Amino acid sequence: MKGHLDVKELEKCKKADLQKLAKELGVSTEGTIKELAERCAEVEVEIPDESELTEEEKEAAEQAAVEYAEENKREEPEKDDEPQAAGTVTVEVTAMYLDKVLNEVKEPGEVFTVSRERATILERAKVAKIKE
């Protein structure tokens, strides 16, 4: 599937990485980070299928799964003053990852509900953010 890279995500990259990407995409490697990001985002690229995760995404998913397992082995979590039903929070996916707990690929922008502990783990893995 064809598509374009996200300018905002590209602007978070280091200049050297953007220059390398620009060279690979066949565009000018000169200019600021913003200019490089815009130029790279204009190029149509092959987008991998949902089932094809990058190594970074696989590592983030594995790390999140390990941290989740570690959290569940510990003593009972601290009790909030709120009732148990309020112990869940809504999270928004910020980076594609394979959620091993739910056994599915989560896409950026997807919103779902998890326990507070799980939300914290996903935030630490930088694959989701808690929606307040």
Image: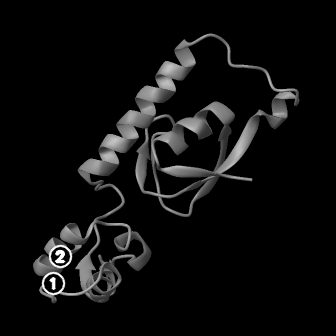
Q: Is residue 74 above or below residue 85?
A: above
Residue drawn 32% across and 80% down?
Answer: 37
Tell whether label 2 touches label 1 (CB within 8 Å). Answer: yes
How far is disc 1 from disc 2 in space, using C-alphas?
5 Å
Q: Which colour assignment does the render follow? A: one colour
26 on left or right of 90: left
Specify few, some or many for label 2: CA neighbours under 10 Å numbering under 14, 14-19, or 20 or more: many
Specify few, some or many for label 1: CA neighbours under 10 Å numbering under 14, 14-19, or 20 or more: many
Mark 2 highlights which residue? 19
Image quarter of the N terminus:
bottom left
Three-letter amino acid code at the position of disc 2: Gln
Residue drawn 78% across and 21% down?
Answer: 79
110 on left or right of 59: right
* Residue 71 x/y as whole percent: 54, 21
Three-letter amino acid code at the position of disc 1: Thr
* Residue 17 x/y as whole percent: 20, 67
Residue drawn 82% across and 36% down?
Answer: 86
Residue sitting at the far top = 75
Q: Secondary structure at mark 1?
A: loop
* Residue 24 x/y as whole percent: 11, 77
**Exactly how many numbered labels are in the figure?**
2
Q: Is residue 117 above or below residue 34?
A: above
Mark 1 highlights which residue? 29
Q: Secondary structure at mark 2?
A: helix
